[in-house]
């Protein structure tokens, strides 16, 4: 009994409620196979998939899932796009869906157990290959153009895209999953983007469509930060690009856009 109490105390110290861990992680944190088995048998640990555990499954939130992916499994996945803008108070667009959608950007694949969680949340993973070149100087570092943000009272942080990167991530899905109207509404709230961060992000972005769309939407707002961007160092490619069928060609950026805009 005394040994079980010690093990339980060790578990509580290293593993807060709702944190999702793996068998490997627990062993790396000085819990033996025997101790883990006993903790599962006594319901101190709950198994949600083979080799995947949580303490108090009812406390799981989408934030604790993402924190576990980033900090326990060390996956290349950051909170990005619309979700990152929402977390930073930069999105006021209300979704009509009952389920929250959490957008994750990175080159690692979501584990299967994430999809099987009983949460009213849909995790959508996007690759960043089409946004930033794999061999770019910035992308050699782990997760470029990101920041950290507290999500609970225990000083635990989530890694998320900066507003500058997050908006470019949104533009990746225009018009297939994000409408021109939605993208236009979003940029109306981006009055305080950092010209310095924006410059670096745009210079490292390799997606011509995204960069042309960004400048097209930004020109409509004529923000102060736009005048501080050195456009000569940002390549926009050549030739016309059809973004939307039946649209009107914008001759400045050589993209088709909805005529009503």
Image: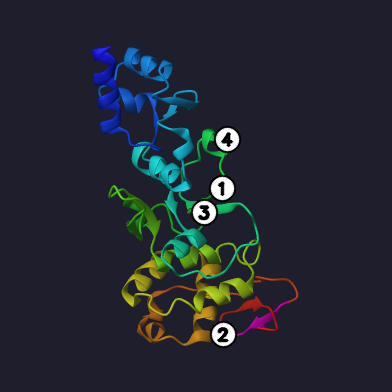
Which residue carries the number 3 mark?
A: 103
- The range drawn in magenta is 247-251
Which residue is farthest front? 1
Q: Nearer the viewer, mark 3 or mark 4?
A: 4
Prevailing secondary structure of the magenta residues: strand
Residue 20: x, y in percent?
41, 35
Cα–Cα span, label 2 and label 3 = 31 Å
For residue 206, say whether it is visible.
no
Q: 10 Å neighbourhood of mark 4: few (<14), some, or many (≥20)? A: few
Residue 185, position in %: x, y? Answer: 56, 76
Which residue is painted at 45% across and 26% down in the image?
A: 46
- Crowding at dot 2, Cα within 10 Å, few <14 / some 14-19 / many 20+, comes out as few
Q: CA distance from mark 1 to mark 2?
A: 40 Å
Going by the image, does 23 lie left or right of 7?
right
Judge left or right: residue 38 versus residue 108. Answer: left
Q: Which residue is mark 2?
A: 252
Question: How far apart are the two marked residues, 2 and 4, measured between alpha carbons?
Answer: 47 Å
* Residue 168, above or below 46: below
**Image quarter of residue 94:** bottom right
Tell whether label 4 touches label 2 (CB within 8 Å).
no
Q: Which of label 2 and label 4 is nearer to you?
A: 4
State the residue position of label 4: 116
Q: Is residue 59 visible?
A: yes
């Amino acid at each position: 009994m005394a040994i079980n109490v010690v093990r339980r105390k060790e578990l509580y110290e290293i593993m807060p409620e709702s944190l999702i861990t793996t068998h490997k992680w627990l062993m790396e944190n000085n819990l033996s196979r025997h101790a883990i088995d006993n903790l599962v048998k006594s319901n101190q640990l709950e198994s949600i998939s083979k080799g995947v555990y949580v303490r108090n499954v009812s406390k799981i939130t989408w934030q604790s899932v993402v924190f576990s992916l980033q900090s326990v499994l060390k996956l290349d996945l950051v909170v990005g796009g619309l979700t990152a803008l929402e977390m930073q108070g930069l999105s006021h667009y209300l979704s009509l869906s009952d389920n929250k959608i959490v957008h994750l950007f990175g080159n690692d694949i979501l584990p299967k157990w994430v999809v099987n969680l009983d949460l009213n949340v849909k995790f959508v993973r996007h690759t960043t290959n089409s946004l930033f070149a794999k061999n770019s100087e910035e992308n050699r570092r782990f997760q470029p153009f990101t920041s950290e943000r507290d999500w609970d009272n225990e000083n635990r942080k989530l890694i998320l895209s900066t507003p500058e990167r997050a908006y470019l991530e949104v533009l990746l899905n225009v018009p297939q999953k994000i409408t021109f109207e939605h993208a236009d509404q979003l940029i109306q709230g981006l009055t305080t983007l950092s010209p310095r961060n924006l410059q670096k992000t745009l210079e490292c972005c390799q997606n011509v469509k995204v960069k042309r769309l960004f400048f097209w939407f930004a020109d409509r707002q004529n923000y102060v930060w736009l005048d501080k961007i050195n456009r000569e160092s940002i390549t926009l490619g050549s030739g016309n690009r059809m973004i939307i069928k039946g649209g009107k060609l914008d001759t400045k950026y050589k993209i088709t856009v909805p005529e009503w805009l």
